[in-house]
């Protein structure tokens, strides 16, 4: 292990992640960047971090992304922070619950202004056709503002601070948008302008408070290797898709990418059984296999065959079971089980024939 890797493992607190767990966090950041159009330029840097995690580089990347005026890049940074903030305490429950109530109140108030604007837009006596485009932009900004505030509260209830940060960031940017500036000037009403500014100040306070919360990603210790194995295939498929979005492979690998992403999400949740995640892996590899004949490029086909083989190995190594209801499971996965998995000894939580 090199010096940088050793520094990565320097204790920050009792919950410090090891190098494999840090790699999973970075992999999640890479995967999110692939799915965010405005974060694409960060992908090469993130891929280098994934291949060789170094704490100093992680800190630099996180700072650079947060300094951007692009909130998609902020999203990636919030994920990266999960490997850097392991020693930070969670906010006191009473504090964040009170904060959540305040955010919900502002969400309802902003939404009320949005509905008022909707009703006014429908009033043909007051609104001209030339006014409608600008009013539609104001309406959309208010909707994004309110919806993001609502999402913040939902994630806070689950103590999912990463996604709470993502949503409060969106709410803050929506509140500061030019469309909201236009709303203040459109009505030429100083009282309305004062109210909007007050809402903006509250949103800014919420934003500053929640961004001080630690990012958290709980990684089940007994699933680390499996997550890394699936993640490696997932990110390779994402890379192939990203390199040329018009390639023949994209229709073949789009669905497997989605299924592997779901599998990783399930693997990260201890409430989800391994069988549930593995079913998603089976769906992904089955679809990939069926699409291979459509690939005319021999080199690309070889790459995809190798990735499919790796997924088959993962699927075979994990616990698996058919869909609970006979004839409702997907053929891609069901075909991998015995021809009659619903025989007398098969049990989905109900009594078997031998038990009755």
Image: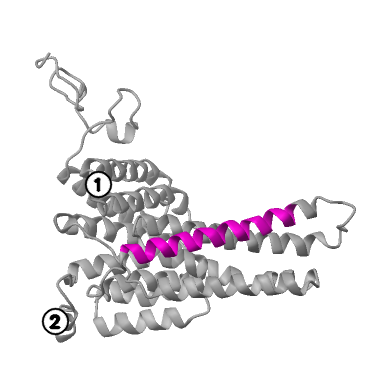
**Number of other residues with Cα within 10 Å of mark 2, as a class: few under 14, some 14 to 19, many 20 or more:** few
**Position of residue 215 measured from the top left corner of the image (x, y, whole percent):** 32, 69
For the question of whether residue 41 can be seen, the reply is no
Q: Position of residue 156 (x, y in %)?
A: 39, 59
Residue farthest left in this picture = 354
The count of marks equals: 2
Q: Is residue 68 visible?
A: yes
Q: Is residue 115 magenta?
A: yes
Label 1: how many Cα within 10 Å (few below 14, some 14–19, many 20+): few
Q: Secondary structure at mark 1?
A: loop
> Which residue position holds label 1?
271
Foreground tag (2 vs 1)? 1
Compare residues 52 and 32 and report the one nearer the observer: 32
Whether residue 235 is in magenta: the answer is no
Q: Which residue is mark 2?
A: 6
Left or right of 190? Residue 322 is left
Q: How is the image coloured?
A: one colour
254 vs 20: above or below: above
Residue 346: horizontal and vertical position, in percent?
16, 24
Q: Report the span colored magenta.
A: 93-118
Q: Which residue occupies 72% across, 55% down?
A: 116
Question: Quarter of the image holding residue 83?
Answer: bottom left
Q: Residue at x 42, y 68 (%)?
A: 165
Q: Nearer the viewer, residue 338 or 271?
A: 271
C-alpha separation, residue under disc 2 versus residue under disc 1:
32 Å
Q: Residue at x 56, y 59 (%)?
A: 107
* Residue at 28% in and 72% down: 50
Q: Is residue 203 left or right of residue 208?
A: right
Q: Is residue 305 above or below residue 20?
A: above
Q: Residue 143, labelled with which disc?
A: none
- Measured as percent of width and height from the top left, residue 179 is found at 69, 69
């Amino acid at each position: 292990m090199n010096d940088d890797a050793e520094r990565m493992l320097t204790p920050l607190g009792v919950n410090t992640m090891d190098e494999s767990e840090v790699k999973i966090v970075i992999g999640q950041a890479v995967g999110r960047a692939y799915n965010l159009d405005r974060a694409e330029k960060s992908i090469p840097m993130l891929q280098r971090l994934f291949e060789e995690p170094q704490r100093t580089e992680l800190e630099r990347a996180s700072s650079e992304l947060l300094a951007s005026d692009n909130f998609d890049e902020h999203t990636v940074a919030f994920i990266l922070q999960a490997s850097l903030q392991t020693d930070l305490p969670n906010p006191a429950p009473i504090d964040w619950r009170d904060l959540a109530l305040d955010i919900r109140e502002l969400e309802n108030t902003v939404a009320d202004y949005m509905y008022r604007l909707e009703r006014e837009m429908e009033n043909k006596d007051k609104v001209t056709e030339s006014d409608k485009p600008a009013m539609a932009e104001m309406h959309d900004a208010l909707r994004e503002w309110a919806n993001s505030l609502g999402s913040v509260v939902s994630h806070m209830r689950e103590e999912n601070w990463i996604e709470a940060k993502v949503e409060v960031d969106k709410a803050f940017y929506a509140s500061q948008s030019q469309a909201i500036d236009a709303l203040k000037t459109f009505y030429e009403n100083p009282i309305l302008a004062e109210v909007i500014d007050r809402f903006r100040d509250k949103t800014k306070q919420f934003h500053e408070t929640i961004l001080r919360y630690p990012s958290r990603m709980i990684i089940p210790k007994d699933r680390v290797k499996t997550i890394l194995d699936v993640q490696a295939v997932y990110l390779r498929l994402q890379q192939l898709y990203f390199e040329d979005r018009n390639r023949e492979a994209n229709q073949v690998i789009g669905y497997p990418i989605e299924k592997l992403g779901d599998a990783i999400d399930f693997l990260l949740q201890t409430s989800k059984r391994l069988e549930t995640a593995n079913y998603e892996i089976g769906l992904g590899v089955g679809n990939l296999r069926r699409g291979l004949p459509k690939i005319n490029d021999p080199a690309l086909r070889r790459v995809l065959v190798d990735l499919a083989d790796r997924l088959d190995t993962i699927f075979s190594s994990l616990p698996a079971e058919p869909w609970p209801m006979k004839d409702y499971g997907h053929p891609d996965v069901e075909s991998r089980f015995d021809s009659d998995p619903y025989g007398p000894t098969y049990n989905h939580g109900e009594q078997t024939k031998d038990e009755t």
